[in-house]
Image (cartoon, rainbow, N blue to C red):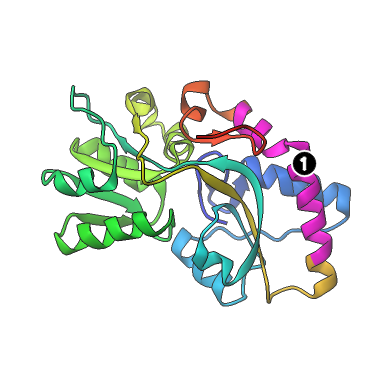
Amino acid sequence: MSATGQSVVIEGDTVRGIYPELLSALSAKEKCRFVISPVPRARLEKLFESGQADMIVASTRSARRDQFGVFIPMIRSRATAITLEDSARPPFRTTQEILDSKEVRLVVVRGYDYGPNYHELLDAMAKENRLLLEAEPTAVARLMRVNPHDITIMVPTIIYGAMQEDSRLQDDRDKLRFEPLDNLPWGESGVYLSKTSMDPAMFKHLQAALQRATISGVVYKGFAGYYPPHVLKDSIKPLDRATP
């Protein structure tokens, strides 16, 4: 697992958060044992693609991940533009507006995937030397604190949760400005199971257990317990809630 807001919190070799709590409950109920190792996000993606990791939790659905795993949706989620800039600037509405703002640098977590429009923006910003890649969300938040014109794109709960866990960043949480982008719409977030790393019986057992957890709504309830409503508003919804 990799650090992902309050979804996955890593403290040394200790892993906790919404999804570890889910797996702990499944372990007790389904009589299975999960072995969790903390790794950076990009490393986790490579392990999953090579069949060395059985699952990725707190993951948005993407065409690339669909090549290597079967997706089990748990919630609906949306990545937005996020800044710490305290100004009267009109909000960004599209990724093109971010690209056209030449004073802006984009700082993102290596390995995150929010679809083709997101990757097109990353490629364009990289060509202009305005892209910075970091290993985890806390590093992104620290850079944004030092450089007010920096902007990131991720699901708001991720950066808010990372700042909750860092005493140097906690006071900046309420300064975060979330700006939904028209060409980064709502999608699904949940768990990917590897197509190749598990025997078929184990795969079916775990898939069925996770699908039962989805029906119960336990993951959304976890988010509602960890985050204030104004953060969830632009980032997380239950699967059965109507979305634009």
**Magenta segment:** 204-224
Whole-percent x, y for residue 174 in the image: 37, 23
Whether 166 is drawn above or below 16: the answer is above
Whole-percent x, y for residue 119 in the image: 34, 60
In magenta segment, residue 210: yes
Query: Which quadrant holds residue 110?
Result: bottom left
Image quadrant occupied by the N terminus: bottom right
Residue located at (38% from left, 57% from top): 135
Callout 1 secondary element: helix
**Amino acid bearing label 1:** Ile
Residue located at (44% from left, 43% from top): 185
Whole-percent x, y for residue 227 in the image: 54, 27
Whether 148 is drawn above or below 104: the answer is above
Whole-percent x, y for residue 179 in the image: 34, 33
| Nearer the observer, 51 or 214 | 214
Query: How many neighbours does mark 1 have within 10 angstroms: few (below 14), some (14-19), or many (20 or more)?
Result: few
